[in-house]
């Protein structure tokens, strides 16, 4: 079976070629199999977010190779990367990042709308089903600002799932939530993972949550020091 | 969401709706600018129409007359001898246009000419008792001449009747000579014959010169007074397109061999004034349009900063740079278009009120109310285009935003 993600000797440096050059990721190798539910841990400044941005095709590595579903991304131009990102990767961020001008339902429809350009009934049905699955059926016509943090994060999960991506990257998805909401959101992600075999890579500082994942990857000073 | 609307349109409209106050303020600003442009354009157009109609109501588009007489140089005695001559220009005398009936017939056949009227323009003397005044006599055939100069419209007393015994004079001449309609005047022309004519009407052309000095008599009477039996000194022409008068005048000059002068050539100073007015209005409108463009650009620059997180998340979910670019260009276009609609209504209403309130002392309008739909159409198109152009820099900035940087503000 093709790995969802494979990274080979990825490095990332900033200010290259100047005296202020700094390398934040060193020779990272990582593979994620379909259906894995993985926690990515490490102290602040260890390079977790940079690694996540590179995996999410939001940033390019300085060297090394990155494969998404077996496709090497190094040779793709910006437009092709954008397309691949839209189809294969879903994002959940710590600060929810819903678009405040749209309702919960429209936020979930957004990735499909971006891809197809015109709204369709199928998109609406899909978004409706996803919100029902997240327990937000009643809230689908609410604007993002009129929802609690936990509800917004569940909308964000629904949005990340809209395009049926093979990989979901979650950057501290429960970092701003209370304990009850944290459990709800985490359970929701786990449920989707088990049901659809969607691969999750979750950045977290919460060791209890990390222990409930299939695997924990520890990053320290820009290197993977543990992957078990 | 409207199923016929593309993603970029949906996002642009939602962003504008969400920043409601910002949108209202910038649309108001654009509307003010567009309103000023509509108002000034309508005012300029109406004033020009008014000026031109005033100029043309008292003069024909083209006047044809005999060529000026000039001194013919003597033939040189031989090629070795250069004569030391002093050329004295001959005095111009009133002469009839040779073959004028044929010329009138030819002109009447042209499709670009509306009316033709043959007249005599001569000088004379009007005498009543001890009072006398030099006058300019125009001998006319009322039927054809009134098509060109709407003299009946300016008659304030009497009827525009012109038998061979009648004369129509200006109100200031009538006052000077102390006469009114039905009374007699002694008129002397170049022939030195004195004719006693009855005043059939008194006109007011709104211009002191003609009101003091002009008089209209029947063509036959003028022929007798000026010793031009059967002749005419001028052929007056009205063309269908007043602005084509100069071209047509040149064609007539070539085809007839006579002197043909258009109203454009004889009113060159007037046209310079109109041109200057157009240029100054154009400059003002240009600056107003520029300030509108800067207003749109500044609002969208702020909007890009405010929406950087939205742009970042849209980019993360697969929105291309071109899509982001279009979202902001569309916002500029929509702002320009909305502003132009409100501005068109404001400008149109402002002009209507101005036209209604600003009047001459006798209550008559100063200029005609002229508001052409094409002016609104062009202004809306220009405002929407200005909006798109003004949005270009902020839109490029938005499209080029690094999604990672954008999401972290």
Image (spheres, coloured by chain):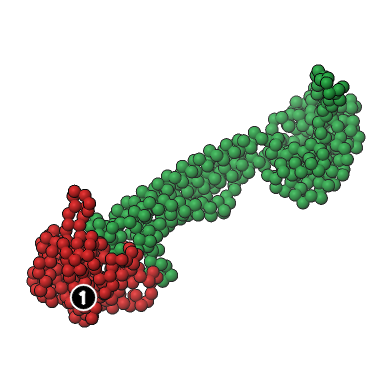
* Residue receiving disc 1: A199
| Nearest the eye: B29 or B310 | B310
The quadrant holding residue A73 is: bottom left
| Nearest the eye: A54 or B377 | A54
Task: Name the residue at 20% across, 60% down.
Answer: A12
**Chain A: colour as depicted:** red
Vertical order, B365 against A143 (above or below): above
Task: Name the residue at 90% across, 37% down.
Answer: B230
| Nearest the eye: A175 or B132 | A175
Quarter of the C terminus of chain A within the rendering: bottom left
Q: Where residue A187 appears, x then y in whole percent?
A: 16, 76
The quadrant holding residue B59 is: top right
Vertical order, B299 against B172 (above or below): below
Specify whether residue B46 is in view: yes
Q: Where residue A25 appears, x then y in whole percent?
A: 17, 61
Task: Name the residue at 79% across, 38% down.
Answer: B64
Quarter of the N terminus of chain A within the rendering: bottom left
Q: Where residue B19 appears, x then y in whole percent?
A: 33, 56
Q: Tell me the chain of label 1.
A: A
* Chain letter for the green part: B
Specify whether residue A99 is in view: no
Category of crowding for the residue at label 1, using alpha-carbon neighbours closer than 10 angstroms: few (below 14), some (14–19), many (at least 20): many
């Amino acid at each position: 079976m093709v790995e969802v993600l494979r990274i080979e000797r990825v490095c990332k440096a900033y200010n290259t070629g100047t005296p202020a050059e700094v390398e934040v990721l060193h020779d990272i190798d990582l593979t994620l199999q379909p259906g894995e539910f993985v926690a990515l841990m490490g102290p602040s400044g260890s390079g977790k977010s940079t690694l996540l941005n590179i995996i999410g095709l939001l940033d390019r590595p300085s060297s090394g190779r990155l494969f998404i579903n077996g496709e090497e991304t190094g040779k793709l131009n910006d437009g092709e990367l954008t397309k691949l990102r839209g189809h294969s990767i879903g994002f959940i961020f710590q600060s929810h990042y819903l678009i405040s001008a749209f309702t919960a339902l429209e936020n979930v429809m957004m990735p499909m709308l971006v891809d197809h350009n015109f709204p369709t009934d199928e998109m609406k049905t899909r978004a409706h089903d996803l919100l029902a699955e997240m327990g937000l059926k009643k809230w689908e016509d609410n604007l993002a600002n009129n929802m609690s943090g936990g509800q917004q994060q569940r909308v964000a999960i629904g949005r990340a799932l809209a395009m049926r991506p093979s990989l979901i990257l979650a950057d501290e998805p429960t970092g701003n939530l209370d304990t009850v909401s944290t459990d709800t959101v985490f359970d929701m992600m786990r449920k989707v993972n088990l049901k659809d075999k969607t691969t999750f890579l979750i950045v977290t500082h919460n060791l209890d949550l990390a222990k409930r994942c299939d695997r924990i990857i520890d990053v320290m000073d820009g290197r993977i020091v543990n992957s078990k | 969401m409207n199923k016929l609307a593309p993603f970029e349109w949906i996002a642009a409209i939602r962003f504008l709706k969400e920043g409601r106050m910002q949108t209202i303020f910038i649309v108001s600003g654009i509307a003010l600018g567009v309103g000023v442009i509509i108002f000034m354009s309508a005012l300029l157009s109406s004033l020009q129409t008014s000026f031109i109609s005033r100029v043309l109501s008292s003069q024909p588009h083209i006047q044809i007359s005999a060529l000026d007489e000039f001194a013919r140089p003597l033939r040189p005695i031989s090629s070795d001898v250069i004569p030391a001559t002093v050329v004295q220009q001959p005095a111009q005398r009133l002469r009839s246009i040779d073959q004028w009936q044929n010329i009138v017939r030819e002109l009447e056949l042209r499709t670009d000419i509306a009316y033709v009227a043959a007249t005599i323009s001569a000088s004379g003397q009007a005498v009543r008792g001890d009072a006398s005044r030099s006058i300019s006599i125009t001998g006319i055939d009322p039927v054809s001449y009134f098509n060109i100069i709407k003299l009946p419209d300016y008659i304030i007393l009497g009827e525009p009747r012109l038998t061979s015994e009648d004369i129509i004079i200006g109100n200031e001449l009538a006052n000077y000579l102390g006469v009114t309609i039905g009374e007699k005047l002694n008129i002397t022309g170049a022939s030195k014959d004195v004719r006693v004519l009855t005043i059939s009407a008194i006109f007011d052309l709104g211009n002191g010169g003609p009101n003091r000095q002009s008089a209209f008599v029947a063509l036959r009477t003028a022929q007798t007074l000026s010793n031009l039996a059967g002749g005419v000194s001028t052929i007056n022409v009205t063309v269908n397109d007043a602005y084509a008068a100069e071209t047509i005048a040149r064609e007539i000059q070539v085809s007839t061999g006579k002197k043909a002068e258009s109203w454009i050539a004889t009113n060159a100073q007037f046209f310079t004034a109109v041109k200057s007015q157009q240029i100054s209005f154009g400059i003002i409108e240009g600056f107003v349009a520029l300030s509108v463009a800067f207003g749109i650009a500044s609002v969208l620059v702020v909007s890009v900063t405010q929406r950087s997180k939205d742009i970042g998340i849209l980019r993360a979910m697969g929105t291309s740079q071109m899509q982001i670019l279009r979202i902001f260009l569309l916002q500029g276009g929509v702002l320009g278009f909305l502003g132009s609609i409100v501005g068109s209504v404001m400008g149109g209403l402002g002009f209507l009120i101005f036209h209604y309130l600003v009047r001459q002392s006798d209550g008559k309008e100063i200029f005609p109310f002229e508001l052409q739909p094409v002016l609104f159409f062009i202004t809306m198109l220009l405002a929407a285009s200005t909006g798109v152009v003004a949005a270009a820099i902020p839109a490029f900035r938005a499209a080029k935003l690094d999604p990672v940087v954008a999401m972290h503000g």
